Amino acid sequence: MVARHDLVEDPVVAAGLLTARRGTAFFARKLGELSYADLDDQSLLPGWTRRHVIAHVGYNARAIARLVEWAATGVENPMYASPGARNQEIDFGATLPAIALQNLFDHSAIHLSVEWRDLPAERWGELVRTAQGRTVPVSETVWMRTREVWLHAVDLNNGARFADIPAEVLRRILGDIWGAWESRGDAAALALRVHDGEGGFTLAEPRPGVTVIAGPLAAVVRWASGRWTSGKGEEPGAPLTVTLDDGSPAGVPTPPRWI
């Protein structure tokens, strides 16, 4: 008999699944607020309409589901057939009729959720390979999807804010961004200070020659992810502040590339 509940036993993974599904529901709500004509408008991502964002999120669910199937069967099933396949899918998906785009999102999200649900507890540690070539346990797919749905709900550019994203998701996104910057040497001239109701923390202490970016968690992540100057409205709370190493104020710089 097919399971009707998640088979995973790891409480951390189980909690992650809940956050991923909540993010999917949030994306679905923001998508549902748009008319079919609205889908042609610009998203927060340069060169992408809302159609591109929806297609990406839909095809991403299918790609991640292939990794879960790989873990379940032991048969290699990569996210994409080739390095260019992802972009080709998105460009094609953006041309679909609006109802087809809606169905793509709905059906792919359900498919992925079912693949996660039915994956036996003992197979959550199976190794799979991401589109970037990283070898990770299949449990990592939960975070991969969580990041996609929460961030791209904001990218739909119809009122979702970074402050709507759970604090634990924002902190992990910021950790991913900082890690990417460090790996490329892009973090050397920056220090980040987060201060909000969840408690503050610092990524790299201020030192000679650095620019300090400080503000509430949502504002700092919005800036670090490259979305500070676009979109509707500002994040609530204290504003983002930028200072040079000598303490003088500075304009908001463009962040280093993340992905």
Image: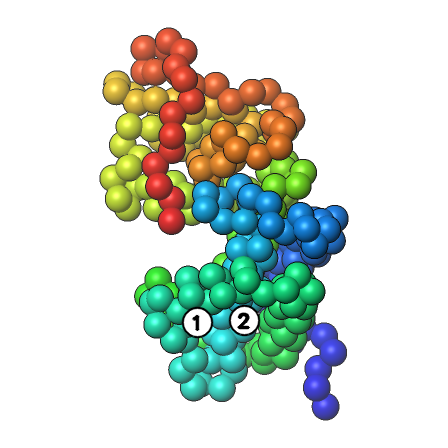
Within-10-Å neighbours for mark 2: few <14, some 14–19, many 20+: many
How far is the residue under mark 1 from the one under mark 2? 8 Å
First in sequence: mark 1 vs mark 2: 2
Q: Quadrant of the N terminus?
A: bottom right
Name the colour scheme. rainbow
> Element at badge 1?
loop
**Hey, what amino acid is under mark 1?**
Met
| Above or below for 122 versus 35 | below
Nearest the viewer among 205 and 25 is 25
Q: Residue furthest bottom?
A: 1
Measured as percent of width and height from the top left, residue 58 is found at 57, 64
Q: Which residue is mark 1?
A: 79
Picture quadrant where residue 16 is located: bottom right
Q: Residue at x 74, y 78 (%)?
A: 4
| Above or below for 1 versus 91 | below
Residue 33 shows in the view: yes
Measured as percent of width and height from the top left, residue 204 is found at 35, 30
Picture quadrant where residue 190 is located: top left
> Element at badge 2?
helix
Q: Residue at x 59, y 80 (%)?
A: 120
Q: Which residue is mark 2?
A: 62
Q: Which mark is residue 236?
A: none
**Hey, what amino acid is under mark 2?**
Arg
CB contact under 8 Å: marks 1 and 2: no
| Above or below for 161 versus 94 | above
Measured as percent of width and height from the top left, residue 77 is found at 43, 80
